[in-house]
Structure formats: structure tokens, C-alpha cells
Amino acid sequence: GENVEQHPSTLSVQEGDSAVIKCTYSDSASNYFPWYKQELGKGPQLIIDIRSNVGEKKDQRIAVTLNKTAKHFSLHITETQPEDSAVYFCAASIGQAGTALIFGKGTTLSVSS
Amino acid sequence: DSGVTQTPKHLITATGQRVTLRCSPRSGDLSVYWYQQSLDQGLQFLIQYYNGEERAKGNILERFSAQQFPDLHSELNLSSLELGDSALYFCASSGSGGAWETQYFGPGTRLLVL
């Protein structure tokens, strides 16, 4: 079945460093790729998304790249801050309507000051 | 705050019981989605409704059912509960339920089956 692989599962960086999280998806029909941040005790919050008609999108310190040929997409966070510490999930649209999301297993990012 | 509300926040019940989780979407959103988050399975899509009609179905067990009412709130019913049903259940909503739409997640309901 459809699958999204996410790496690494944990990531520790120093404040100010960059963090990169990578995902691979299996469904070639996937065309929407959101990234969510989940803090303890809260629901996932969208931080950035990319659609299949673009290869890169940036929003301040956050950027996402998409390689549809290789079925890879990545999240890049620059100048990390302690408040970036959370669990990050990648997701890909699946299903006939393309509305359901399949999520990766998550990456726990720890930013130490 | 996403604007999606879920009740209750926590629920403790026994095996074999039935519970109902409630979700109110963001103002103006017509579509709701239900997800289950557990340590072993991660975040899994269960089902989507748009304006009262089922639109997409995921790995939802036959013991689980959902519906969306005319006022657009949704309920997820879980019956014959098993220990393995203990998880966080999230509701999300989006405008028209179409592809490429941002899904806004609620704070979740934590279910513990003893």
C-alpha cells in the first residue's frame, strides 16, 4: 500500500544550526505535500506545504523542496531556535480524491541553546 | 488555536464499551477528517466527510463509524472497544474538502481503554 518514509526519527542541533528532514513517498499520484509541527499535548499545526507543480517553496526560515521524479521531499529549517523543538511530520496526499493524507512516522527535533 | 474544537479532551473507559467523540470544524469549513494517532501506527487517516456526505475512507475499523450533521459538526463512534484502541483521535477541517487544501487540526481527544 501507500507509504511515506521519514528520516531521521530524532535530530539534535545547536541553536543557529540548520535542520533537514527527508521524506520519501510511494504513491506516484500524490500531488500535495504538507509539513506539520506537533508540540506536546497539541494537535499538528501546518508549517508549510508544497504542491506538485512547484519544486521549492520558502517561508522565512523554513523551506521545502520536492523531487517528483525521485519521490522525495525535504524540510529545511535554518537558524534554528529552541522554540523549533517539536515533532515534525511530513505527509502526502493519497486516494482517488487526493484529499486523504498519509503521514510519516515523525522526527523529534531538539534545539539546544 | 486552529479554530477546530474537539470534546471531550480525555476519555477513560473499559473494554467492550462504546464512546462518541465530537468535533466542530472551523467556521466556514465544510469538510471534516478523522485521524488516529498511536505510538505504533503513527498518524492514520480514518475517514473524511464533506457537507454531510462521506468523501474518502481510510483504515477505519468496522467497529468505528462517523457522521457529519447538518450543522457540520461531526461525531466519531467507537464501539466494542479494545485495549489497542487507546490513542489520540484528531479531527481536522478544511474549506471545501478538495485536493491540495490545508487541513487544520483540532487539539485531539485522548482515549484510554482499560
Image: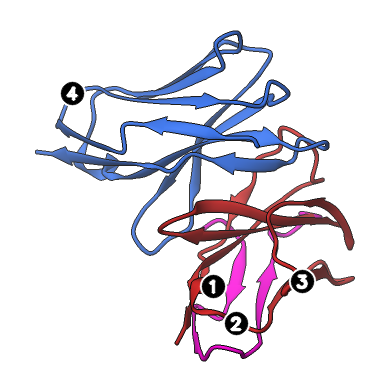
Chain colours: A blue, B red
- The kind of secondary structure element at disc 2 is loop
Task: Output the chain of dot 4.
Answer: A
What residue is pinned by disc 3? Answer: B65
Real-space Cα separation, disc 3 to disc 4, in angstroms: 46 Å
Position of B87 compared to B46: left or right?
Answer: left
Q: Is residue B19 magenta?
A: yes
State the image coordinates of residue B43 (x, y, percent, origin top left).
52, 52
How crowded pointer 3 is (Cα within 10 Å; few <14, some 14-19, many 20+) is rated as: some
- The kind of secondary structure element at disc 1 is helix
Looking at the image, is mark 3 or mark 1 nearer the viewer? 1
Real-space Cα separation, disc 3 to disc 2, in angstroms: 13 Å
Q: Is residue A81 above or below residue B48?
A: above
Task: Output the chain of dot 2.
Answer: B
- The kind of secondary structure element at disc 3 is strand
What residue is pinned by disc 1? Answer: B85
- Amino acid under disc 2: Leu
Looking at the image, is mark 3 or mark 4 nearer the viewer? 3
How crowded pointer 2 is (Cα within 10 Å; few <14, some 14-19, many 20+) is rated as: many
Q: Quadrant of residue A79?
A: top left
Real-space Cα separation, disc 4 to disc 1, in angstroms: 39 Å
Q: Which residues are magenta?
A: B1-30
What residue is pinned by disc 4? Answer: A17
- Whether tag 3 and tag 4 are in contact, CB under 8 A, the answer is no
- Amino acid under disc 1: Asp
What residue is pinned by disc 2? Answer: B81
Real-space Cα separation, disc 1 to disc 2, in angstroms: 6 Å
